Amino acid sequence: MGMNTMNKQDAIRAELAKELIVQNLREEYRLRPIKEYAEQFGVGLGTVQAALNDLKVSGAVELNACGAQGTFLARVDQKALWKMSGYGILVGLLPLDTGRSIKGLATGIYEGFTRYDLPIHILFARGSANRTEILTRGKSDFVVMSEMAYQYALELGKPLMKVGEIGRRGCSYGILTRKGAPAETFRQIAYDNYSYEQRALVRACWPEEQTCGRYLGVQLADLVRTGQVEAALVNHEAEREDGQAFELHPLNGLDPEMKAQMDRAVIVVSTENRALMDLLAIVASKEIVTPVQEAVIRGEQFVRY
């Protein structure tokens, strides 16, 4: 990876700090040889050595040189090292917290960061396509979506990497119609074009001439209510429409693997952020997030984020 910055040493210092944060959290204290860092970052040995010295002078780390055995982290000031990394407060972007599954995921991620005393802001945005756009523009550090949405994004060539599964997405789609309208007779179905999940479901379940997309998710119920569309694809858990006006028909016959992908929540970063990927694999792992999410769903733990 080359460094096109005004101050190469500052950039290398930040990258080294990010790697050492992960090493310290993993309790892996032996540093790699200077030559390996230089090859990784595409700079000279002196630039790496100077950046490492900056970390020592700042008090972020103390190193213990052990000759042929290598150099080891003797002490780490995590807050100072975090400051040198340039991370600041990380921003995670999740689906709208309209259901307990998302509230549980947000609480689990927040508790993971809190456990390691790291700063985090959790925000919410409707539509995995929107969250992907925000991520790739550098306006968030990571996003959460379903495995189905992630795979669809990869098909579109989006520059994403999956950190791992963290829990349940809480998706259970159905067909929303006006009261008394049988789902089997509709000629067209509206869907949220900003949801990769819905786009994948529509592609798998209906011929193109039976769908009418390009709508915002928040418009779907009103489109059905006013008769502008006969039916709309909506998420059972997220949508709470008036039962007097609407009827919700289960979406039956889905392939089991498709259903599994739809319900697996994954955490995703951009392809240029591998250091953050390694960090999130520790502080927002399935082992940390899932038990918290399940406790929130059962009502045994307060929401906190």
Image (cartoon, rainbow, N blue to C red):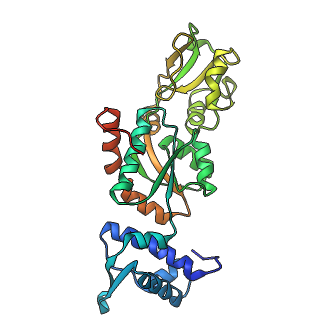
The location of residue 77, given as percent across then percent down, is 36, 74
163 relative to 298 in the view: left or right: right
State whether residue 141 is above or below residue 151. below
State whether residue 21 is above or below residue 55. above
Quadrant in the picture for residue 106: top left
Q: Residue at x 64, y 76 (%)?
A: 4
Q: Residue at x 46, y 31 (%)?
A: 255
Q: Residue at x 56, y 82 (%)?
A: 9
155 relative to 68 in the view: left or right: right
In the rendered image, the quadrant that contains the N terminus is bottom right
The location of residue 46, given as percent across then percent down, is 52, 90
The location of residue 159, given as percent across then percent down, is 59, 56
From the viewer's side, name the closer residue of 188 and 286. 286
Q: Does residue 19 appear in this view? A: no
Q: Residue furthest top?
A: 180
State whether residue 75 is above or below residue 120. below
227 relative to 37 in the view: left or right: right
